């Protein structure tokens, strides 16, 4: 058993330098290598991984224990759930392609929610997109209109999937996840 500081872990996972969705992809795979009740430490430098880990753990039933940060590295700790606690991971069913959103933007004004981190948003976002990072979305739901059609985007579609589920659970009825997200966006962008 190893671990950063005083926290005992059963598996350490190095995701430093990887961007969304790779820390989650590697964490999912790592969970298959440990036993229920064991703890994995995920080392990441992607600021978005904080919200990703919390959201992913919440949707799968695994237990997000917490995160420590030291010298620009986030140390995430997750406990593998026992089989009775595990939830089946289901992608948000309502999606639109990046191309489809771009086509809609040519026809009318659409509400776009960008759930990436502030730095990601600053270096390139869809004009008019509202910036609310996934990690603060629960506290900022009141800034959005529950009955308005809302297109949610992130870098790859992972964080936006988690955001869409959160919005739907809170009464938002017309939410669509934009896949694959900004990573393959060919429409107009602006910088903050």
Image (cartoon, rainbow, N blue to C red):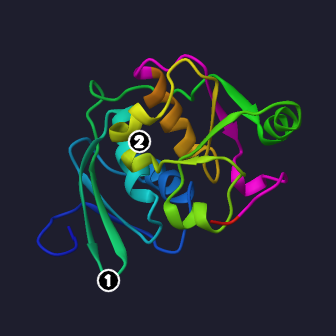
Front: mark 1 or 2: 2
Query: Is there CB contact under 8 Å for labels 1 and 2?
Result: no
Question: Mark 2 = which residue?
Answer: 137
Residues drawn in magenta? 169-190
Residue at x 15% of width, y 66% of height? 7
Q: Is residue 127 above or below residue 41?
A: above
Instruction: State left or right for residue 78 relative to residue 164.
Output: left
Question: Mark 1 = which residue?
Answer: 71
Residue 70 lies, in percent from the top left, at: 27, 78
Q: How many marks?
A: 2
Residue 18 lies, in percent from the top left, at: 55, 68
Q: Is residue 128 above or below residue 23?
A: above
Instruction: State left or right for residue 9 relative to residue 41.
Output: left
Residue at x 50% of width, y 62% of height? 118
Q: Nearer the viewer, residue 72 or 147?
A: 147
Kind of element beneath mark 2: helix
Q: Nearer the viewer, residue 123 or 11?
A: 123
Alpha carbon separation for disc pair 1 and 2: 26 Å
Kind of element beneath mark 1: loop
**Residue 68 figure quarter:** bottom left
Instruction: State left or right for residue 72 relative to residue 192.
Output: left
Residue at x 52% of width, y 26% of height? 90
Q: Residues within 10 Å of mark 2 (few under 14, many from 20)?
A: some
User: Is residue 179 shown in magenta?
Assistant: yes
**Residue 192 figure quarter:** bottom right
Q: Residues within 10 Å of mark 1 (few under 14, many from 20)?
A: few
- Which residue in the rendered view is the most extreme toward the left? 6
Residue 45 lies, in percent from the top left, at: 44, 72
């Amino acid at each position: 058993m190893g671990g950063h500081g005083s926290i005992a872990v059963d598996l350490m996972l190095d995701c430093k330098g990887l961007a969304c969705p790779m820390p989650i992809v590697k964490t999912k795979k790592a969970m298959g290598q440990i036993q229920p009740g064991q703890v994995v430490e995920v080392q990441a430098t992607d600021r978005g991984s904080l919200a990703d880990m919390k959201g992913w753990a919440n949707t799968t039933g695994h237990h997000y224990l917490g995160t420590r940060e030291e010298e620009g590295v986030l140390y995430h700790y997750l406990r593998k759930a026992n089989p009775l606690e595990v939830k089946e991971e289901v992608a948000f069913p309502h999606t639109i392609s990046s191309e489809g959103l771009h086509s809609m933007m040519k026809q009318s004004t659409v509400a776009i929610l960008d759930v990436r981190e502030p730095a990601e948003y600053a270096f390139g976002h869809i004009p008019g997109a509202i910036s609310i990072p996934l990690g603060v979305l629960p506290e900022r739901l009141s800034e959005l209109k529950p009955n308005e059609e809302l297109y949610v985007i992130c870098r790859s579609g992972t964080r936006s999937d988690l955001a869409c589920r959160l919005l739907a659970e809170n009464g938002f009825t017309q939410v669509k996840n934009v896949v694959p997200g900004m990573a393959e966006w060919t429409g107009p962008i602006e910088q903050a």
